[in-house]
Every structure is written in structure tokens, then in C-alpha cells.
């Protein structure tokens, strides 16, 4: 059965995609820790990030760097925090989280519930900044 991320990749369920190339997709987390919290996934459905072949893993990190630069150019933050947890969805993914303190990337914190308008607004800004 396809993961929820594969369904997003296949456009079977809606999402706020902020960047894409032939191998990777980046989209906003709908229940973010902070606005701008973005997930980056390989288009190939592989559960565990360290089961990705070396080229796919390296390329994913380079793609994340480009996405992170776009996020930090439109979201006020000190830097982009990076987290790989990998238990919540059986599809390798990296969290890119705008942070100003360690608490901003604490996954035990309550998540935000931004409106569709807020997600669309931040998405549009990240898309425009992605190079």
C-alpha cells in the first residue's frame, strides 16, 4: 500500500508543494512545529532513510540544502533545523524546520494548525525563492 507521501507525490491527495525535481519533492507539513516546516521526500518509496542508495541519499541532502535556503529567505529564523525521525510514515523523509531556539524543533510540542490561506501564503513565498 502506498504511503501518504507517495499519494502526495502522485497528486492523489492535496498538499502545498514548494519544490520538486525528478527525484525529490518538498512540501509543507500541514501540522507544523512552526510555519515553514517542510518535509523533503525521495519520489522512490523507501521506508528507512539509510536504505537509500548512496547517490539518492546524497542528492536528497543537496536538494534539502536548496529548499532550506529558500525557506530561510522568507521565514524569519536563525537557521533551518534538520530532523530525521522516520517512525511516523514508512517513507524516508527529512524535516526542515525554521528555528530560533532548540525548542522550535521539539517534536513533543503541540503542533500548529495553520489555515489553508496561511499555508498557501508561505508556500507561494518559498516557491518564489527556490532556485
Image: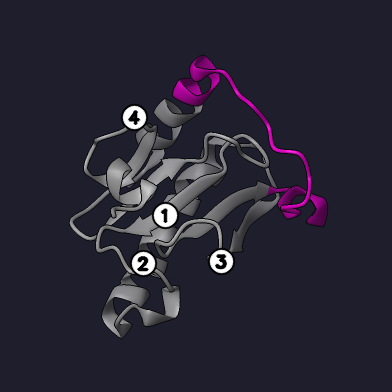
Identity of the residue drawn at 41% across and 68% down: 61
Element marked by disc 1: strand
Tell me, yes or no, whether the highlighted magenta stretch contains residue 32: no
Q: In this view of the protein, which residue sits in the foreground, 128 or 115?
A: 115
Q: Residues within 10 Å of mark 3 (few under 14, many from 20)?
A: few
In the picture shown, does residue 87 fall above or below 3?
below
Q: CA distance from mark 4 to mark 1?
A: 16 Å
Secondary-structure class at tag 2: helix
Marks 2 & 4, CB-CB < 8 Å contact: no
Q: Which residue is mark 2?
A: 60
Q: Return the x and y of residue 68 as percentages of the image width and height.
A: 49, 53
The answer to which quarter of the image holds residue 123 is: top left
Q: Disc 4 vs disc 3: Cβ atoms closer than 8 Å?
A: no
Residue 84 disc label:
3
The residue most toward the top is: 117
Asked if the stretch drawn in magenta spans residue 111, the answer is: yes
Write down the region rendered in magenta: 99-121
Mark before the other along the chain sequence, 1 or 3: 1
* First-in-chain label (4 vs 1): 4
Judging by the rendered image, the residue that carries numbered circle 1 is 40
Question: What's the distance in space between the residues labelled 4 and 3, CA to CA?
Answer: 23 Å
- Say few, some or many: other residues with alpha carbon within 10 Å of mark 2 (under 14 / 14 to 19 / 20 or more): many
Amino acid at each position: 500500500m502506498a504511503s501518504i507521501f507517495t499519494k502526495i507525490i502522485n497528486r492523489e491527495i492535496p498538499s502545498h508543494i514548494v519544490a520538486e525535481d525528478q527525484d525529490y519533492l518538498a512540501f509543507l507539513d500541514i501540522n507544523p512545529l512552526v510555519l515553514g516546516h517542510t518535509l523533503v521526500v525521495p519520489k522512490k518509496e523507501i521506508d528507512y532513510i539509510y536504505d537509500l542508495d548512496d547517490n539518492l541519499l546524497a542528492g536528497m541532502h543537496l536538494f534539502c540544502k536548496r529548499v532550506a535556503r529558500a525557506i530561510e529567505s522568507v521565514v524569519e529564523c536563525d537557521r533551518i533545523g534538520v530532523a530525521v525521525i522516520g517512525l511516523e510514515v514508512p517513507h524516508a523523509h527529512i524535516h526542515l524546520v525554521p528555528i530560533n531556539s532548540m525548542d522550535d524543533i521539539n517534536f513533543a510540542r503541540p503542533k500548529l494548525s495553520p489555515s489553508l490561506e496561511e499555508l498557501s501564503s508561505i508556500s507561494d513565498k518559498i516557491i518564489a525563492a527556490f532556485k
